[in-house]
Image: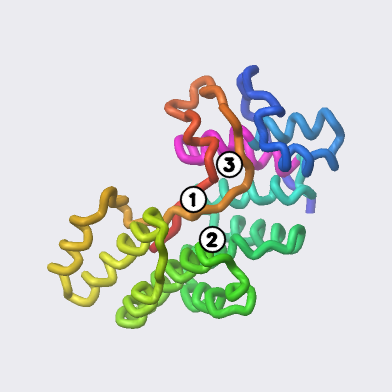
């Protein structure tokens, strides 16, 4: 089925193909030169806007998908933009396509959280128990366990959620913070409000929605100039495209 034509949002003149990470530029070389540069500039905009204007980021990602959909990084960008806008069915479909294209399992935590977003916590837990999950890096495995704990909380299995979170060991401060953030609602569900209050008070920064940020890299943008009319999009947007989960 042919995708509907997406009207391309404007891109500031200062956004250049060369600002993309070299590896990503190389992966886009399977496209014609002009098309690769066009797709790459839309990827830059999608990455720069995903936190400040997710819907506009999604439109850029959709244009890139329409013009370069056989390239895995393009599918990754569309998946993240779809996820950021709550289009979990599309995000999950795109992430599965990425796995077929490059064989990577790094997005299992995000896929599991999409399953939660679709009201299917059992499937999120199944992903955490899969053979592919066992092959993840220690960091990605911890991210997946956080999501699985949230899925257990969704199912009302609060004690199991707490046990799963307590099993996560990490020396990464940001990841430990996310584990603690995910633990707060579990403690409250157990009626341990005092413990939850104490843990919450100790967090350096507590996300008001109790959401997880996933450390996943789609593409890196070096020294990205501030986009025109893009609010506060700045160099922070050139980092990994951390998306937001449900735990």
Q: Which numbered disc, 3 or 1, marks the residue that appears first in the sequence?
A: 3
> Is residue 162 within the magenta segment?
no
Task: Magenta stretch: give its range.
Answer: 44-66
Is residue 70 depicted above or below 160 in this figure? above
Residue identifier under label 2: 110
> Percent from the top left, x then y, of residue 14?
62, 18
* Residue at mark 1 to residue at mark 2: CA–CA distance: 8 Å
Q: Residue at x 50, y 77 (%)?
A: 125
Mark in the foreground, 3 or 1:
1
Residue identifier under label 3: 58
Q: Is residue 97 left or right of residue 172?
A: right
Label 2 packing within 10 angstroms: few (<14), some (14-19), many (20+): many
Quadrant occupied by the N terminus = bottom right
Q: Residue at x 35, y 82 (%)?
A: 160
Q: Is residue 195 visible?
A: yes
Residue identifier under label 1: 243
Quadrant occupied by the C terminus = bottom left
> Percent from the top left, x then y, of residue 37?
76, 30
Q: Is residue 56 visible?
A: no
Label 1 packing within 10 angstroms: few (<14), some (14-19), many (20+): some
Numbered disc 1: secondary structure = loop
> Percent from the top left, x then y, of residue 140?
53, 63
Q: Residue at x 73, y 35 (%)?
A: 39
Could you tell me what secondary structure mostly forms the magenta stretch?
helix
Q: Which numbered disc, 3 or 2, marks the residue that appears first in the sequence?
A: 3
Front-lying residue, 221 or 151: 221
Q: Residue at x 57, y 65 (%)?
A: 137
User: Which of the 4 image quarters holds residue 212?
Assistant: bottom left
* Residue at mark 3 to residue at mark 2: CA–CA distance: 17 Å
Task: Tell how many labels.
Answer: 3
User: Which of the 4 image quarters holds residue 20?
Assistant: top right
């Amino acid at each position: 089925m042919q995708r509907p034509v997406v009207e391309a949002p404007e891109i500031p003149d200062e956004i250049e193909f060369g600002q993309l990470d070299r590896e990503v530029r190389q992966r886009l070389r399977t496209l014609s030169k002009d098309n690769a540069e066009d797709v790459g500039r839309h990827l830059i905009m999608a990455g720069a806007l995903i936190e400040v204007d997710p819907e506009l980021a999604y439109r850029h990602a959709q244009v890139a998908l329409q013009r370069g959909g056989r390239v895995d990084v393009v599918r990754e960008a569309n998946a993240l933009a779809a996820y950021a806008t709550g289009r979990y069915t599309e995000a999950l479909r795109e992430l599965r396509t990425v796995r077929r294209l490059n064989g990577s399992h790094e997005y299992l935590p995000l896929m599991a959280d999409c399953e939660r977003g679709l009201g299917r916590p059992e499937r999120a837990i199944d992903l955490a128990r899969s053979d592919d999950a066992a092959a993840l890096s220690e960091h990605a495995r911890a991210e997946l366990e956080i999501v699985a704990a949230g899925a257990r909380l969704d199912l009302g299995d609060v004690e199991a959620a707490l046990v799963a979170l307590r099993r996560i060991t990490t020396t990464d401060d940001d990841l430990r913070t996310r584990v603690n953030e995910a633990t707060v609602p579990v403690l409250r569900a157990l009626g341990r409000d005092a413990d939850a209050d104490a843990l919450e008070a100790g967090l350096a920064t507590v996300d008001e929605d109790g959401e997880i940020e996933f450390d996943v890299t789609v593409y890196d943008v070096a020294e990205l100039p501030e986009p025109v009319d893009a609010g506060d999009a700045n160099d922070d947007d050139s980092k990994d495209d951390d998306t937001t989960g449900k735990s």
